[in-house]
Amino acid sequence: MTRLRLSAALLGTCATAACTAPASNQAGAPPASYFDTTGRADVYSGGARMIPITTPKGTFNVWTKRTGNNPKIKVLLLHGGPGMTHEYWEAADSYFPAAGVEYYYYDQLGSYYSDQPKDTSLWNTARFVEEVEQVRTALGMDSTNFFLMGSSWGGLLAMEYALKYQHNLKGLVVSNMMSSIPAYVAYAEKVLMPAMDPKVLAEIKALEAKKDYANPRYMELLIPNHYEKHLLRRPAAEWPDGMNRALKHVNNDIYIPMQGPSELGASGKLEKWDRSKDLAKITVPTLVIGGTYDTMDPKHMEWMSHQFPLGLFLLCPNSGHMAMYDDGPIYFGGVIKFLKDVDTGTFAK
């Protein structure tokens, strides 16, 4: 649920024929069929396409981009924010292709690569759920192949989608997201904030009390004392390009109304969101991922995995909120094993 304002402080042709790459001799490489784009409408654009989305305020377009071809494992990636972008998910490029996973980047409505309407009534969870369903339909995914994977706010959205449309799912991945915003706020207040230097915390809280969030000092304090410890655990100057672009492209017109302006809690439309009592209703195989140093409580996320009838927990031991970077091999290795176990019917809780 982390804001992207941080970046201000950092900074062929074959449209009608099949394009099939030769099989690789490398061990573990995907088969030639992974590169077969026969019959794909997105061949000319390299897998990218704009999908029209019907909303109560008219029709808008959202951006998606496919990599790979696997009729049995198709993963739609939901980014965080709300109002972030798909760009931080680019870490998947280092892991999914070699495993033969077909996956889709997707900028939710209002995010950088998609249309950005100004009507604030569009920024609510229920409408985003319907958007995901329309994207699924347009991409031709169903319960025989559709895996939904969301991180942070995307994990919240994935749970909401599953509660309404799990009959369309083959599996669900909830990455670095708790099932309760009040519990998330309590974790920040009781665990993360007390661990800060008291003088630093006092200055941060003073700026928040004055609503002086645009003050450069706010990020000067948060970057070394919060983000580098609990968001992505390395010096911000070394953060990967995809992460920095995602931060640069945040849409605060969505983030602030839904999440709120504070980086140490939530006060927007999502403030009272809590689905902890409803997790047992999600009966598809579900992987929950947490990081030891996450902004989200790892113990709560482990607890969540036990509430899902077919739930499994993956702890990334060196990770903050962006576990896909902090513990890439563990993170994606666990996801790939989950996807393949579900697909082959060998998944076990």
Image: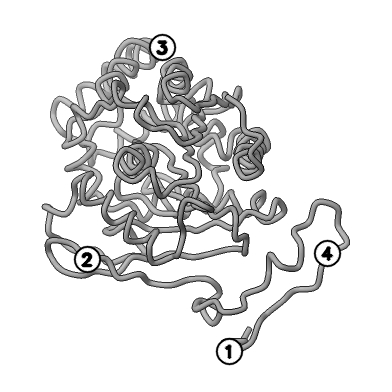
Q: Name the residue at 47% across, 40% down.
A: 172
The quarter of the displayed image where residue 274 is located: top left
Estimate how packed mark 2 is, as few (under 14), some (14 to 19) or many (20 or more) residues with alpha carbons within 10 Å. some
- In the rendered structure, the answer to whether residue 349 lies left or right of residue 281 reads right
Residue 62 on image: x %, y % = 33, 65
Q: CA distance from mark 1 to mark 4?
A: 24 Å
Residue at 15 percent of width and 33 percent of height: 211
Q: Amino acid at mark 1?
A: Thr
Q: Give the CA distance from mark 3 to mark 4.
A: 50 Å
- The residue sitting at 36% across, 40% down in the picture is 162
Q: Position of residue 193 (x, y in %)?
A: 34, 15
How far apart in space, not on screen, are marks 1 and 2 (Cα)? Answer: 29 Å
First reached walking from the N terminus: tag 1 or tag 4: 1
- Looking at the rendered structure, the secondary structure element under dot 1 is loop
The image's mark for residue 195 is 3
Give the residue displayed 27% in from the left and 21% down from the top.
203
Asked which secondary structure carries label 4, the reply is: loop
Q: Kindly give the residue lying farthest to the right in the view shown.
A: 25
Q: Position of residue 161 (x, y in %)?
A: 33, 44
Which residue carries the number 1 mark?
16
Q: Give the labeled residue for mark 2.
A: 54
Q: CA distance from mark 4 to mark 2?
A: 42 Å
Q: Which residue is mark 4?
A: 24
Among numbered discs 1 and 2, the one appearing first in the sequence: 1
Q: Residues within 10 Å of mark 3 (few under 14, many from 20)?
A: few
Q: Nearer the viewer, residue 234 or 252?
A: 252
